Image (tube, grey):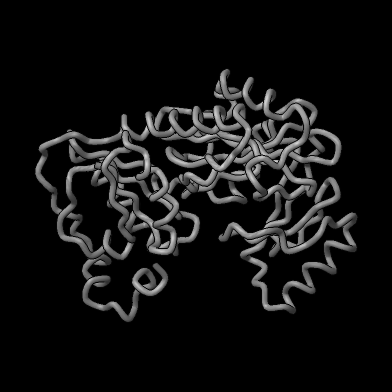
């Protein structure tokens, strides 16, 4: 059994793999449930949505993470909520380690980036950038003042140096790889004529992209680089998004709660369909390896004053309302 811990509104992110006949048994539970339940059944628990948690919630969730991993056979947890790095900490670490050419800065510190252009994003939510590319320091300073006046808290904004290049013609490409415990799995590529590649139709791509994707898929490319990024991020389950700049991977973010849907199978191109089928099967195989086929009895949840307060004083808690 797999138990995904995350917000109600993200349940659909994992329901997609239930259409596959060989999918593992799973449940989706909220952090509110995690803090309230008295007993924890035998399962592999996957903590998601960590970057959206309040620090108090992260502390409680981390205690339960360690409690589960100490329970012995039949119990496992992935993604320590106390250790997993958010977007800013990850980007700064990857730059300091010489992996990324570009750097990131907290907007609240009114930074002076070493290279331009830059753009501004939210730190705690995965939304499109709040600005276009800003070409110099004056433009950045004005943008931060404007954002603050528009009620954007600067301590939830990050300034990121732009680092991307077209893949083919006007097309930019976003590559991705999953980590599911110890398994690294290269995923399908996405293409767009804009530098911020989010999502387009599955067959929207430049000429020759299918063959290039197939080669990377067969090689399960960039495994060593991807594993190091996940290790530095202290993340055991998620999807990292990256691109190639000068032939070198540049890593942009890790999604703690990636979609696992069947929409990618809408491709009408045989090669593209073969690519996405291989990627999905690798993810399913990794998830099946996590399935705890155990007769272990449930364990008691942690005994903690904050857990008790959470149960008895719901008006003081964040999780029931937010999740």
Q: Which residue is found at the position 62% from the left and 23% from the top?
A: 214
- Vertical side of 30 occupied by 191: above or below: above
Answer with the quarter of the image where residue 121 lies.
bottom right
- Vertical side of 39 occupied by 226: above or below: above
Answer with the quarter of the image where residue 204 lies.
top right
- Vertical side of 160 occupied by 185: above or below: above
Q: Nearer the viewer, residue 221 or 112?
A: 221
Q: Which residue is found at the position 47% from the left and 46% from the top?
A: 261
Left or right: where does residue 46 sit relative to residue 274? left
Residue 259, given in percent of the width and then of the height, sits at 49, 48
Q: Farthest residue in the bottom direction?
A: 315
Q: Which residue is found at the position 58% from the left and 24% from the top?
A: 217
Residue 55, given in percent of the width and then of the height, sits at 44, 61
Q: Which residue is found at the position 46% from the left and 40% from the top?
A: 235
Left or right: where does residue 200 sit relative to residue 321? right
Q: Nearer the viewer, residue 231 or 22?
A: 22
Left or right: where does residue 145 sit relative to residue 280? right
Quadrant location of the N terminus?
A: top left
Residue 52, given in percent of the width and then of the height, sits at 48, 60
């Amino acid at each position: 059994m797999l138990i995904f811990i995350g917000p109600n509104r993200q349940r659909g992110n994992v329901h997609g793999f239930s259409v596959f006949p060989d999918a593992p048994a799973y449940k989706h539970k909220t952090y509110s449930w995690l803090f309230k339940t008295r007993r924890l059944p035998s399962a592999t628990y996957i903590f998601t949505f960590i970057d959206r948690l309040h620090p108090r919630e992260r502390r409680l969730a981390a205690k339960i993470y360690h409690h589960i991993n100490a329970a012995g056979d039949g119990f496992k947890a992935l993604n320590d909520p106390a250790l997993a790095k958010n977007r800013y900490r990850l980007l700064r670490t990857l730059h300091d380690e010489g992996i990324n050419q570009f750097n990131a800065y907290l907007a609240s510190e009114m930074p002076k980036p070493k290279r331009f252009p830059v753009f501004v994003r939210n730190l705690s939510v995965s939304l499109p950038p709040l600005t276009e590319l800003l070409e110099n320091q004056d433009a950045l300073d004005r943008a931060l003042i404007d954002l603050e006046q528009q009620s954007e808290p600067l301590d939830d904004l990050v300034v990121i140096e732009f680092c991307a290049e077209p893949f083919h013609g006007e097309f930019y490409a976003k590559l991705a790889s999953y980590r599911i415990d110890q398994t690294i799995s290269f995923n399908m590529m996405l293409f767009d004529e804009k530098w911020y590649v989010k999502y387009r139709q599955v067959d929207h791509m430049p000429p020759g992209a299918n063959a290039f994707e197939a080669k990377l898929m067969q090689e399960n490319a960039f495994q060593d680089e991807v594993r190091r990024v996940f290790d530095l991020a202290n993340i055991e389950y998620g999807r990292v998004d990256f691109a190639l700049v000068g032939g070198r991977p540049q890593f942009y973010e890790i999604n703690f709660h990636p979609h696992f849907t069947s929409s990618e199978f809408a491709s009408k191109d045989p090669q593209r369909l073969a690519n996405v089928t291989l990627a999905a099967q690798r993810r399913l195989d990794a998830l099946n390896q996590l399935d705890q086929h155990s007769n272990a009895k449930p364990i008691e949840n942690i005994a903690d004053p904050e857990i008790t307060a959470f149960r008895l004083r719901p008006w003081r808690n964040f999780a029931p309302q937010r999740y």
